[in-house]
Amino acid sequence: MRYLVLLLLFISSTCISEETTRPHIAVSAAHWKAFTNIDDSGIYYELIDAVYDEYDIKYQTSTYPRALNQFKANNADIAVGVYQHELPDAHYANWILDTDLPIHIFYRADETLPETEKVNFKGKKVAWRAGYGFSKFFPDLDASYSLDNIEAGFTLLVNKRIDYVLDYEENFVENYRGRIHHQVIREGEKLYLAFRNSVKGRKLAAQFDRKMSELRENGTLAHIYGEHYSRSELASFSDEMPLDDFSSQ
């Protein structure tokens, strides 16, 4: 019995030692349904698990502004799904994470919207969810409002407190169908993983580039992204493509 106890203690201590020697990374992201879920599931998290399978990964899922702030405060090694202009001091891999969904403009059903390329925001009250960097894409905005949630924006819209809401089609609330119309106003931009501009961050970015090529070649990327794969533009992405000017080397 004594030898059995000693053997069990040895095995247990070995397992604990192996666990504690695994390198750690902290990942911050906004909660995007099907992509970054609160329970650590979703397309982007599944991808990160596959790329960094030798790491002990801590996912921090909250709001978009908080995810950016966690990264800026050095509380995350990776920020998920960002535009490069939002974190210009970060380090970026060559590979993109995804191509964002098109931005939709939501307006009251009793309004007539001109062709989207001719929409003039001068004198209009436009709202979108907190942390979304849409102002960069629409420089003629006079008044923009920050929303805690999209339904609050739709309520303001139907009550004529604001003129337009900008968001993604998948976030449309069915209760407003018939009262609110929407259409594409801007095609999706490239989304990235942002890495810390440090030795560790550059190492993680290099591993992302290396593994993304492998995962595309063996069909894993197509499997993970499923119906979103064609939209993501990962299938045609050239890993020799130069980085945007926002990246910091």
Image: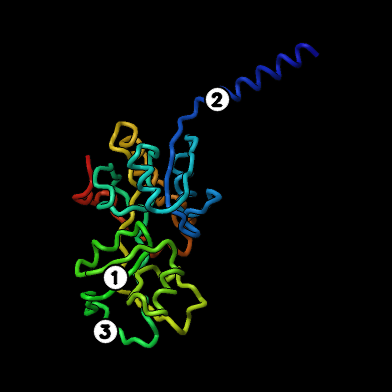
Residue identifier under label 2: 18
Residue receiving disc 3: 114
Q: Quadrant of residue 123?
A: bottom left
Name of the residue lying farthest toward the top: 2
Q: Position of residue 73 (x, y in %)?
A: 35, 39
Residue shown at 44%/50% (left/top)?
218
Image quadrant for the C terminus?
A: top left
For label 1, the residue is: 186
State which tag comes first along the sequence, 1 or 3.
Answer: 3
Q: Secondary structure at mark 2?
A: helix
Q: How many residues crowd mark 3 within 10 Å: few (<14), some (14–19), many (20+)? A: few
Q: In the rendered image, is residue 219 in sight?
A: no
Looking at the rendered image, the disc whose residue lies closer to the viewer, 2 or 1, is 1
Amino acid on which the number 1 mark rests in the picture: Arg
**Residue at the (40%, 46%) spot, across then down:** 214
Q: CA distance from mark 2 to mark 1?
A: 49 Å
Q: Is residue 104 left or right of residue 124?
A: right
Eye-nearest disc, 1 or 3: 3
* First along the sequence among labels 2 and 1: 2
Label 1 close to label 3 by CB (< 8 Å): no
